[in-house]
Amino acid sequence: MSLLKRVMSGALMVSCFLTGHLWAAEAEYSKLNLRPGVTENSQRVFDLHMEVVWIMFAVAGLVFAAILYSVIRFRKSKNPTPAKFSHSTTLEIIWTVIPMLILIYLTKPAIELLLDMEDTSKADMTVKVNGIRWKWEYTYLDEGFSFVSELSTPESQYKDYARTGTEKGENYLLEVNNEVVLPVGKKIRFLLTSKDVIHSWWMPDFAVKMDAIPGFINETWTKIEKPGVYRGVCAELCGELHGFMPIVVRAVPQAEYDQWVAQKLEEKAEAERLAAEAAAKSWSMDDLMAEGKRVYEQKCQVCHQASGEGLGAFPALKGSAVATQGPADDHARLVIYGRGMMQAFGTELTDAEIAAVVTYERNAWGNDTGEMIQPGRVSELKAGN
Ligand SMILES: [Cu+2]
């Protein structure tokens, strides 16, 4: 077989395979194709995409047919003396005008869809999404509460995986501790921003992907038609744990949503009461160290490491000047307000948690300063005293 024939039959096989898959995809979800999603916009994106794909296949079919026809009809054995002409103005006009018409035909639905996707007016509710390396903070602006949503896949499933051989769970790296609950059938506006680097909030089932950029507020929206649990990820390379900041949205009927909001508000009141209680009492060294270890493992360890020895750009706290020589107040201020690439923890942690983690850092790993700081002092530092 000649090389040309091999290439041609290969191309034909690939296009038959793809066509078959796309056909299947129109009926049900295929892993090779976009997903139709659960919003009107995601369905429109999907339909437009399919339309473009079919036009593309028709054009490719025509071009391949013309090539095949010429190759067979004018092969050397049948046509030993080739024609000498070049250029055909008529043909050139045809193959310029037809693609132009196709593009113009596709422009209208594409622009209409883009404009609708940008139109965040008349929203029923607003959720602020804040990207933080490597987690998401959600603030329900109308209801007045917020929470942080972090990866909940146990470390044993991805760290030291080869050694421990732990089974991967069903939603490996796509599960979080706090799901974003949203009502179905409501227009939800999202305001996106970031505390540190550029992140991107991507929910394929909603056809929503919007960058979260520090210092800017981007807007997007969705209206979920079908109750269910939907999963997405951060779609911007944002550092070493970029692949570990998933998004989970649970869409529920309005009544169930109202219940969830009531429960969140209760939790918030309870947390505030506990925080006030914890802040008012005087803690013992042992209590601060125990609580500090818990906070450290949950919030600080990913960067500063369990050994306190740091990693790459994340400085060691073991023996560090801030944790051993400088005053505890400066150490606590750094945790409250952040510094450089280290985020501010002043709103994410309670006064008692900050007091505990600072005390822990000043006494763990042989730092042994013997110094502690009380929640009351953290509260004063937050107030600027
Ligand atoms: Cu990110």
Image (cartoon, rainbow, N blue to C red):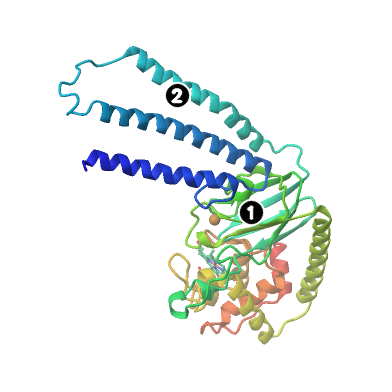
Picture residue at 39% right of the left edge, 21% below the top: 95
Picture residue at 37% right of the left edge, 29% below the top: 63
Relative horizontal placement of residue 92, taking residue 108 as reference (left or right): left
Q: Amino acid at mark 1?
A: Asn
Relative horizontal placement of residue 262, taking residue 54 as reference (left or right): right
The C terminus - image quarter: bottom right
Mark 1 surroundings within 10 Å by alpha-carbon count, few (fewer than 14), some (14 through 19), many (20 or more): many
| Front position among marks 2 and 1 | 2
Q: Relative to 107, is 354 above or below?
A: below
Picture residue at 62% right of the left edge, 50% below the top: 205
| Residue 51 appears in the rendering | yes
Mark 2 surroundings within 10 Å by alpha-carbon count, few (fewer than 14), some (14 through 19), many (20 or more): few
Closest to the observer: 176 or 288? 176
Image-quarter location of ligand 1:
bottom right
For residue 40, what is the image quadrant?
Answer: top right
Extreme residue toward the front, this view: 78
Q: Relative to 46, is 171 above or below?
A: below
For residue 75, what is the image quadrant?
Answer: top left
Task: Tell me the distance, in whole angstroms, between the alpha carbons under discs 2 and 1.
Answer: 43 Å
Extreme residue toward the top, this view: 89
Q: Amino acid at mark 2?
A: Pro
| Residue 209 appears in the rendering | no
Residue 373, position in %: x, y? 66, 77
Q: Secondary structure at mark 1?
A: strand
Q: Which residue is mark 2?
A: 99
Residue 351, position in %: x, y? 71, 70
Q: Which residue is mark 1?
A: 130
Q: Relative to 140, is 169 above or below?
A: below
Q: Secondary structure at mark 2?
A: helix
